[in-house]
Image (cartoon, rainbow, N blue to C red):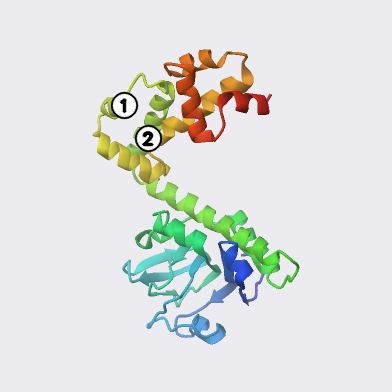
Amino acid sequence: MKNQEIDILKYFITNNSDENWGISCTTVGFEEMKTRDNDPVLLKHPEGYGFKSDQGRTLNEYQLIYIVEGSGVFRSASISQTKINAGTMIFIFPDEWHSYYPDPNIGWKEYWIGFKGNIIDNRTKSGYFSKKQCICKVGYNETLINLYKEVISNANNVKPGSSNYISSVAQHILGFYYYKNLNSIANNNNRVMNMLNKACVLIQNNFTNELSLEEIAQELGVGYSWFRRMFRKYLRISPAQYRIQFKIIKIKELLTSTDLAISEIAYFIGFESKSQLSTFFKKHEGISPSEFRKINQ
């Protein structure tokens, strides 16, 4: 960081309206930690947040910590002591013991944001985030830093809706972490990603069911169970659902960009009849193909 910065600590009082929003921001800030022995987090933060590095702490919220300069270590109940370098994000989970501190000879600078709510709870339960994969190397990212600064600058804003806006920025930071972490994990296995990219092309080229998903897995040289598991793990959707969504996209494209009769579209997409297409489309979109065409003409 070129400019000299001062420590900034902000803590929010949440209410029922914030909680009903689905995710509420609890704290945000920037801090320079110079040595392990000083334990600045113990000296400056309110009770429940501060801790001694040799004792650690347990929070009742999520936090995303971004180390922008320096280095140190992190450990938790789920992972052993791990070295942390600049450009690393750390995901803290509620009720998960953890401890971290900078290299006493180097120190570090960190941004953090805390949040809680049913949205993040549900995403964690659905497997989007893992306590065993809570460290992500994202590098120095000015966009990410500006997101933290955006929350900090609005921390004292008491205008109507300001807390909802702050929480939405927190979701943006969360989405950034998820995207970077997922791709970091995937990039560690180029073979799997190459296979999934090829699988997507095969599904798109055979969306009329010329090849079954089992046959596509066979063409890729893998078992279907493994193929389906990897597809869901990295793309967050099953191969069958991916094919359904691609079919719907093609149907919508033909309904809005051509004058083909719905019976002709049904034949092109691979359905046996107009009624079969209509049943499929209404099941997934809630309206019939003819209604969709009329609305989007």
Binning the other alpha carbons within 10 Å of mark 2 as few (below 14), some (14 to 19) or many (20 upward) gives many
Residue positioned 58% across, 67% down in the render:
19
Is residue 143 toward the left or the right of residue 191 in the image? right
Residue ID at (49%, 82%): 50
For this rendering, which residue is in front, 185 or 72? 185
- Is 147 in front, or is 38? 147
Q: Amino acid at mark 1?
A: Ile
Graded by Cα atoms within 10 Å as few (under 14), some (14 to 19) or many (20 or more), the crowding at tag 1 reads many
Q: Quadrant of the C terminus?
A: top right
Residue at image x 41%, y 20%?
Answer: 208
Percent of width and height locating residue 157: 73, 70
Q: Which residue is situated farthest in the right direction here?
A: 159
What's the mark number on residue 239?
A: 2
Measured as percent of width and height from the top left, residue 45 is found at 55, 82
Amino acid residing under circle 2:
Pro
Q: Give the label on residue 290, or none.
A: none
The reply to whether residue 88 is in sight is no
Among the 4 quarters of the image, the one containing residue 296 = top right
Q: Residue 80, position in %: x, y?
A: 31, 68
Is residue 33 depicted above or below 244 in this figure? below
| Closest to the observer, 259 or 75 | 259
Residue 222 at what x, y percent from top left? 25, 33
Q: Nearer the viewer, residue 149 or 94?
A: 94
Q: Quadrant of the N terminus?
A: bottom right
- Describe the element under mark 1 as helix, strand or loop: helix
Q: Which residue is mark 1?
A: 216
Q: Are marks 1 and 2 in contact (CB under 8 Å)?
A: yes
